[in-house]
Image (tube, helix red, strand yellow):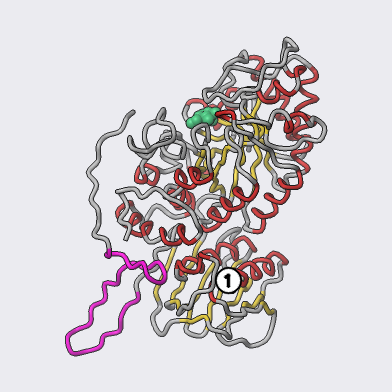
Amino acid sequence: MQHSPRRRSILIAGAVGLAGAAHLTSPAVAAPGRTAPVTPPAPALIPKPRSLKMTGGRPFEITADTAVVVRHPAPEARRTAEYLATWLRRATGHAVPVVTSGATPQAITLAVDNETPSAEGYRLDVTHGGVHLRAAEPAGLFHATQTLRQLLPAAAESGTPHAGPWTISPLHIDDAPRFPWRGSMLDVARHFFTADEVKSYIDILALYKINRLHLHLSDSQGWRLEIKSWPRLATYGGSTEVGGGPGGYFTQREYADIVRHAAERHIMVIPEIDMPAHVNAAQASYAELTCDGVAPPLYTGEKGIPNSLCTDKDITYRFIDDVLGELADLTPGPYLHIGGDEALATKPEDYRFFISRAQQTVHRLGKRMVGWEEVGLADIAPGTVVQFWANAAKAQGALAQGAKLVLSPSKKAYFDMKYDANTPIGHDWAGYTDVQDGYTWDPVTYIPGVTESQVHGAEAALWTERVATFEEVQYMTLPRLPGVAEIGWSPVDGRGWEEYRVRLATHAPRWSGLGWRYHRSVEVPWG
Ligand code: NGO
């Protein structure tokens, strides 16, 4: 454990206004005897927008007249408008119709932005008379709705109507992400989580503009996706989990529903089938996937066990063609993650051969390969996405071949690491990761010699050997997730730990409203 004790100051509770929108305290002071205009406080948004100006004047208010007006041609814009209206109806109890034309007072308008084209950027203007969200692409409009969500009181999150008032101070925001890949990985293999739990997880990701949900769908302790051509993978390989619980798996229909729920929130699902190692559940289901033809028993232990698909058997490649083929059909996005980590039972030359074959399959299916940093030891195509977790040399080997890096440093972004010595669950092999550790790193400077254009982004990873329930998932995720989201989205200038933790504190009522548990770290000045 490489953790130096750090002095922590705790701000006095009450220094942060928790009532109403998540706002920081205002510096404005009226001169005695005169009423000075009060500068409204800057809202405590996470991730912090690229530019935000409080423009002054009377606030906008959502009333019974408020409508959502769509003036963006993309069909997804209409879907985002419906999403926003549904959310506002639940919060306010107002009718909030979605319309495409007509002069509507107190409108929230979703419009196209021809001036600042950007894949995920948006502009948001609040005036007394209305709110304007503008974006070139539908993803930007969706992100704008999540900013708007954070501008409204946390009470809106509970899903039952609340009296308001629903006001927002006038402002102008011009925003776009620093990196295209802002991810979060959930290991549903070591412990299984249901489709509804995964959807709840997606909803929190959306709030923080995370745009990749990486699902670790197979490991030695469980296979979690129905594969029609190899049915026992799920029915037998998915029948247990770490600790011997009942496990489970997603039917293809349930999985497609998860992908749809994510897509509606502009989140791409990155499915991972881990190979050639981490395959005990598959080998227990089909003996022909082992070299000696003997199926091992199901495994419910916590520690990694050495195993490998048999790299010189034809059936191994029929298996990966079939599995990745069905997975590709379920994956609208361009990526398939083939794992590739910790292949300790595979000889280096066999590993290289296997990864080349897996890569050919991925490319034949019209997809791009994603792999953990170890795939940098094999020949990989330029543009392969390589996920760094521990070994800089392997990541650099991948970069030398033209790969793009996604950073998930285990010392910073592994949410299975304990916060500190008192954390009742989790690992500590990479050290403790408190909230400050999780926030104070940079994806470009973390590995020496890396340039900004080689980095696709950052991704948190929640491995679940020691995370057994969805409550525990919540506890390990919050309050660390917003930190990774901000690292991936916001410019470095203008933000820092001391001001971040004050912003972060104001988000707690929002999490509670959503029914999420979180770790009440002493580093954060919760009100
Ligand atoms: C490692 C290992 C996983 C473990 C995790 C636990 C990678 C990429 N492979 O990370 O199988 O679950 O550590 O922290």
Q: Helix, strand or loop at disc 1? A: helix
Residue at 27% across / 65% down in the picture? 14
On the image, numbered disc 1 is attached to which residue?
Answer: 90
Q: Residues within 10 Å of mark 1 (few under 14, many from 20)?
A: some
Residue 359 picture location, percent across and down: 70, 30
Q: Is residue 33 left or right of residue 150?
A: left
421 drawn magenta: no
Residue at 52% across / 35% down in the picture? 463
Beta carbon at label 1 within 8 Å of ligand 1: no
59 w.r.t. 76: above or below: below
214 w.r.t. 84: above or below: above
Residue 515 in view here: yes
Query: Which sits in the foreground, 488 or 515?
Result: 515
Residue 114 in view here: no
22 drawn magenta: yes
Residue 468 picture location, percent across and down: 52, 37
Q: Identify which amino acid the numbered label 1 is placed on.
A: Arg
Dividing the image into 4 quarters, which one contains the C terminus? Answer: bottom left
The answer to which image quadrant residue 85 occupies is bottom right
Residue 426 picture location, percent across and down: 44, 34
498 w.r.t. 3: above or below: below
Dividing the image into 4 quarters, which one contains the N terminus? Answer: top left
The answer to which image quadrant residue 105 occupies is bottom right
